Amino acid sequence: MTTQAAAAGLKHSVTRFSDGNKTRTVIKCQLADDCRNGHEHFSLTADIDEKDNRGRWCESGGGCCHEHILKIAPEFAPFAPLHLSDQDGVPMHAFANAWYWFQGAFPEAADHSKSLGACHGGTGSGAKSPADCRRIFCEHLRITDTEAGQIAALAPRTETELQIILEDMGLPARWKADAEAAITQLEQWTGRKFVSGAYRKSWEPVKPELRELAAQRRASGYYSPEQVAARDAAAAERRKSKRLAEIRENFEKKSDNARRELAVDLYVAERFGHLNCIYYTHTNTLSFNWTTTEKLVTREEFSAFVAAADLSKLPQDIKFEFKDKPKY
């Protein structure tokens, strides 16, 4: 089909009937920036209706039900692996998600340096087996299981190292080729020429200085069990020291508040027995007439108190507050 016009997004849909015309599926395949997040995404979804006993179409399912779609429309096969990849074929959160599933597939590579331990596809309430993590890792990156084994053999220990390996394998170029082939197909189906309006990139190459750092760390034995254990021990000591300092600081703060509150309470009780007032440590304010459940202090009584106050026996820079109408 000859292309007719340029378009920032390409959308193609077909309707297929199956199960003896009892099931109607509207298949929607597109490359567009419907989310307006700065780059286009491939999407392959469907709306599925089934005919009831009265011959009426009723909604029965939908979404990225790729198994159902490809069963009735195998020509969409190239688009299923590209679902949610951007206009360059880069998978969504390509390297972050890859590292997440890689650690689940190969737990020995997991990052245990976090205070709560490793966090990956094999941990948490939705933890998956290493085999499932490995399968998802391959599907996410659109690689073979053999290639996953080759990546594991290189023993990446960080997300950056994994990204370096994937870049050196030429994956971004492969992803780009997948996207270009799919775009060509969409252009043929729609009769329009795709022109990307993307102003954001899903993938940025690892910077040379980070590549150099990764190489230096490997050469220096940075990831050796001994050095890893030493760093973990040092990190644990730093966390402990920080926590101890926080505890002491919190104690001193509470102690200071208690001392100031004691000084105010003793001063008021010794001179007046009891007054409708409350001391707020966080603002260093003695507030009069804070509640309606006690006798109100008059303006004259308040003024007399402030005038005669012995500030040497009260917290430094204390403030006095009078309320005509109590809040409580």
Image (cartoon, rainbow, N blue to C red):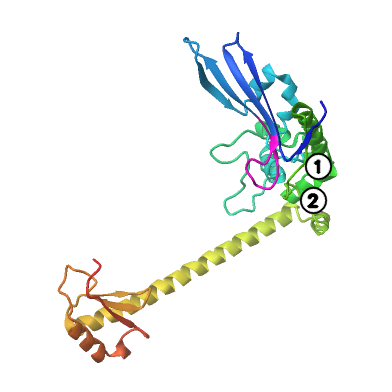
**36 magenta-colored:** yes
Residue drawn 81% across the image and 42% down it? 172
Drawn side of residue 243 relative to residue 185, left or right: left
In the rendered view, tell whether residue 81 sits above or below residue 263.
above
**Magenta stretch in the rendered image:** 31-44
Drawn side of residue 119 relative to residue 102, left or right: left
The residue tagged 1 is: 172
Give the number of the disc on residue 205: 2
Give yes or no for contact between labels 1 and 2 (Cβ–Cβ under 8 Å). yes
Q: Earlier in the sequence, mark 1 or mark 2?
A: 1
Residue drawn 62% across the image and 38% down it? 122
In the rendered view, tell whether residue 87 sits above or below residue 11.
below
Which quadrant of the rendered structure holds the N terminus?
Answer: top right
The answer to whether any part of residue 134 appears in the image is: no
Q: Quadrant of residue 287?
A: bottom left
Q: Amino acid at mark 2?
A: Pro
